[in-house]
Amino acid sequence: MTKSPCRRLTDFGPDFVNQLWRVVNDDVMGGQSTGRLSFDAGTLLFEGEINTDGGGFSSARLPLEPQTLSGHARIELRVRPDDRSYTVMFDDNCPARARRVSHRAPIGFRTPGEWQTVSVLLNDLYPAALGKPIEELPFRRDLATRMGFMISDDVDGPFRLEIDWIDLCPQ
């Protein structure tokens, strides 16, 4: 059996990392979407309801320690998604930026309702501000400060995403 070159960021076991996750909904800008996190049997459940009247997003975010992503080229996660579209997002602390920018990429799920392992290349992240793609400096893995998952698919209604684990992989 070949040992994986990936490093487990979290498996949502009974540790303090779970306490660091936070939900940020569109109510920060006047929206009415809801989102919540729960942890059960070693999984994270991110669920809620999107309301596109005045907003239309919910996100789950985890602060990262300095250098967490250094030497890694992708994240790999085991998930059970619904039939909605989600993105993974990262923030960095690049001193050359004059504004707050997140770097995002869609998560490509194969089959709604089934457990699956998916990957996102960090080189596929695009810069965005207030949810819109922008021209900006590329993502600095070595300066990453936060990662998260977001739903902002312009569709009203409930959402549900389960995550079993998250790995950081060098290739």
Image: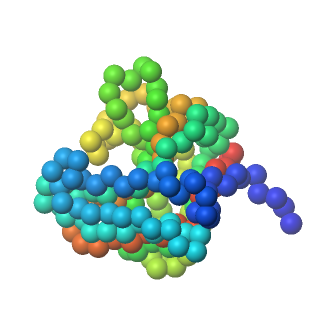
Residue 5 in view: yes
Residue positioned most to the left: 53
Q: Is residue 164 above or below residue 124?
A: below
Residue positioned most to the top: 96
Relative image position of residue 142 (x, y in whole percent): 58, 32
Task: State how the image is colored.
Answer: rainbow
From the viewer's perspective, tell me whether residue 133 is left or right of residue 21. Answer: left
Residue at horizontal 46%, vertical 54%?
21
Residue positioned most to the right: 1
Residue 87 in view: no
Q: How many marks?
A: 0
Relative image position of residue 32 (x, y in whole percent): 18, 60
- Name the foreground residue: 85 vs 146: 146
Q: Is residue 6 above or below residue 125?
A: below
- Name the foreground residue: 16 vs 145: 16
Q: Quadrant of the N terminus?
A: bottom right
Residue at horizontal 38%, vertical 23%?
97
- Name the foreground residue: 135 vs 131: 131
Residue at horizontal 34%, vertical 59%?
151
Residue at horizontal 44%, vertical 21%?
95
Relative image position of residue 102 (x, y in whole percent): 39, 40
Relative image position of residue 52 (x, y in whole percent): 18, 61
